[in-house]
Structure formats: C-alpha cells, structure tokens
Image (tube, coloured by chain):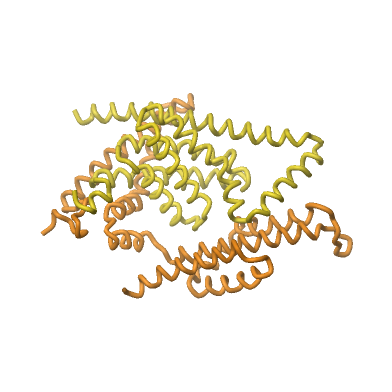
Amino acid sequence: MTGKQKKTNGYGTRDWVYIGLFGALWGVVELSLGSILHIIFPPLTNTFFAGLIPGMLGCIIALTGRRFVDRKGSLVFIGLITGLLKAFSPGGIRIGPITAIVMQAVLMEGALDLFRGKSIAHIPAGMLALGWNFLHRFIMLRLLYGKRFTDVALKMAKDGSTLLGIPETAIWAVLASLLISSLAAGAAAGLAALRIGRTVEKRMAKTHE
Amino acid sequence: MNDMHVTEWSRVLLCTVFGVLAVTLRPVFLLFCVPALLAVQLIFNREGRLLFTRGRFWILIISPVVIGLFLGERDGSLWFFHYSQEGLQAGLHMSGRALCLILAFGTLLARASTRRLIASFEKRHMAGLGLALGVAHNMLMTLSGMSRAVFCTIRLRGGFRRPLAGTRLFLIGVICAVLREGDEVVRAAHARGFDAILDGHGKNPNLP
C-alpha cells in the first residue's frame, strides 16, 4: 500500500460515491425540512423543537450510510459533505448549523469506534448526536459572545424566576428534562437506524439476486 | 504559487487574525476592529453586504444590547427611560465580539464555491473527497425529487395514517433508491476510468 492509499484508508470509488450520496440525502433533509421548520418556529426555539426532527432524520440517514461505507471515519466525511452543502445553500453561510452537523458526525463516528462497530453502538451514537443538538446553542453562544454570556444568562434565569415567582431550581429542572428528551430521541433514532439499515440491506440483497 | 493560492491563504490568515483579535481584545479596542473588518469585508467580498439584510444577523447583534439594558441595577437614565449601565457595557462588548467573529468567518468563505472547492481538493490529492462533493452537489436536486416521489407514493397509499410506520417506510424507500442511484454513478465513474485511490505520486494508476 502506498502513502496516499494509507492516507485515504483504502477508500474506493464506491465508498466516495456513497459518502457523497448519503451526505446529499442528509443535506436534503437539512435544506428542505430544516429550513421550513426554522421559518415556522421563532429563532430561539429551533434547538429544542425544530432542530430535533431534522436532527433525528439526519442521524438515521448518517448511521445507515455508515453501514454501507464500512470504513473508519466515513461518517465524518458524510457530515463534512452535508456541512459543505449547507454552507453553499441559498440560505447563505451560517456558522451554527455547519458546526452542528460536523460535530454530530464526529460524535457518532467516535461512539461507533469506541464500541468497535457493534450494533448496540448505534444507540449511544444517536444519543451523543442529539445530545449535542441540545448543547449546541449554548456552546455556540458562549463562543460568539464570550464569557459574559454565561453571566448574562445566569442573571436572566435569576430575574426570570423572580418575575414568574418560581424557584430557580425549576429552570434547571426544565433544562434537564429537555436534555433527557433529546437523549431519548437520539436513542430512538439510533435504534431506528439499526432496524432501517438491516431492512435496506436485506432488500438490496434481494435486488442483486 | 499562483494568485488563487495566495488569495486562499490570505483569507485564512485574515480570518485567524481577526478571530483572535475579537476574542482577546478589550472592549474599547473592538471599536477599531469592527470598522477594519467592515472595510476588509467590502474589499474582499462585496456580496457580503447581503449579510446586513438578514433579520437573523440583526437579532444576533442587537439582542445582547437590548437584554443588557434591563439586567442588573438600573443606574443610568435617558429622559424617562432607566437602564443598567453595566448591562449596556456587557451587551455592547458581546455584540462587538459577535460582529467581529461573524465578519471574520464571512471573509474566510467569501467567493467560495463548490466548483472551486472540488478543484482545490483535487489539487491537494484528495480526488475522492472531490468526487464525493461533486456527486453530492450534482445529485442534490435528483435526490430531492426522488424523496418527493417516495413521499407522495406513500401518502397516496395511506402510509402516513400511522406516522411512525410511514416515516420508516419513507426512509427505507429513499435509501434503497439512493443506493441504486449510487451503483449507476459508480458504473459511470469506472467507465470513465476514474479511480479515487491514487498512487504515491497523486496520479491515477488506471490512466496511461
């Protein structure tokens, strides 16, 4: 094996074509469904509501794609292609969604590598991807606005709880329940990817017979 | 080294410099950083002016200032309006930093296009990634149409009366169609002598 082949980890033409196609399919979900939901919902709700549906579908598509490109790192490339498509979409270049897509792909690949490609790995992979979806807004705002964002957010939470007459701990409870629901959605997406992947594999095998 | 190459690297350099400045500079100096970045944006990326027509951009920039006005002790006043001076300072600093970072990122990706990126990948011996991006870019509309066709088929046959089962059927149908389409693309690529695995010199071993 030559130096270049080692670098590409032996990816063949079929692998790259499948990476491109699954990346494009994830891109279709992000560009069509994601854009529509982001228009319907106000900007700050998209992490918790509008982001969850395309996130789940994207997670299912990417994990199923990984099944058909069984090479280390292929999921990262799928995410990279989707991120680039999103960057050049008519909506214009936005840092947030591109970072979210690539990070989700990296986390899913990491989980699959950690469990050495076992089927059960799809569940933690989905949980990590959708869990990131929840944390993404906070991390991006912290990066964009700096450390003062944390102070302002805490102050807002405090003032808000005083205004509404609810204890401060209730805010943390709401955030925790949102995170748990994201993780549950991720686990469901991982499980769905596993089942869909198996069905597609059987169906394609029948077609090739 | 051609001009294009220099331009790409100069964009990366500009983005890095302004990104670091935005993160490390004290609030007062951000006042000088913002006009400089605006000037750079107008020189390198005239289409970047479109950024200022987007509502989302203004929400990101204005919301910290507006929120800051009402946070903390309201020790300042403008006619009948009382506001928090500390909150206003914090809001302005946050907005300045965000503006710098958004403009720096815009400068980096200014005038970038899929075609240029694919050419750039191939120049750097990453023909496979270039192929994947090319396939994705060219197949986007086909896949979109394919997804719509599968969705309509399932809907017309009443598949979405049970939404979860319908969504599962939809995904299976679309992914099978994608894999079939992929086989066609692979056959076409092989017929044209394309091989993503290059030899040690970055050349296609299948070509003379």
Q: x and y percent of residue B90 in the render?
A: 72, 58
A63 in relation to B50, above or below? above
Q: At 69% from the left edge and 69% from the top edge, which residue is drawn?
A: B28
Q: At 65% from the left edge and 56% from the top edge, which residue is drawn?
A: B59
Left or right relative to B190: residue A147: right
* Residue most extreme to the right: B80
Q: What chain is colored yellow?
A: A
B30 in relation to B161, above or below? below
Q: What chain is colored orange?
A: B
Q: At 41% from the left edge and 52% from the top edge, which residue is drawn?
A: A85
Left or right relative to B56: residue A80: left
* Residue most extreme to the left: B208
Left or right relative to B142: residue B61: right
A46 in relation to B163, above or below? below
Quarter placement of the N terminus of chain B: bottom left
**The one of B156 and B119 positioned closer to us in this rendering:** B119
Q: x and y percent of residue A190 in the render?
A: 44, 31
Q: Quadrant of residue B165?
A: top left
Q: x and y percent of residue B27 in the render?
A: 68, 65
**The one of A24 and A59 positioned closer to us in this rendering:** A59
Quarter placement of the C terminus of chain B: bottom left
Left or right relative to B158: residue B194: left
Q: How many marks?
A: 0
Q: x and y percent of residue B183 in the render?
A: 24, 41
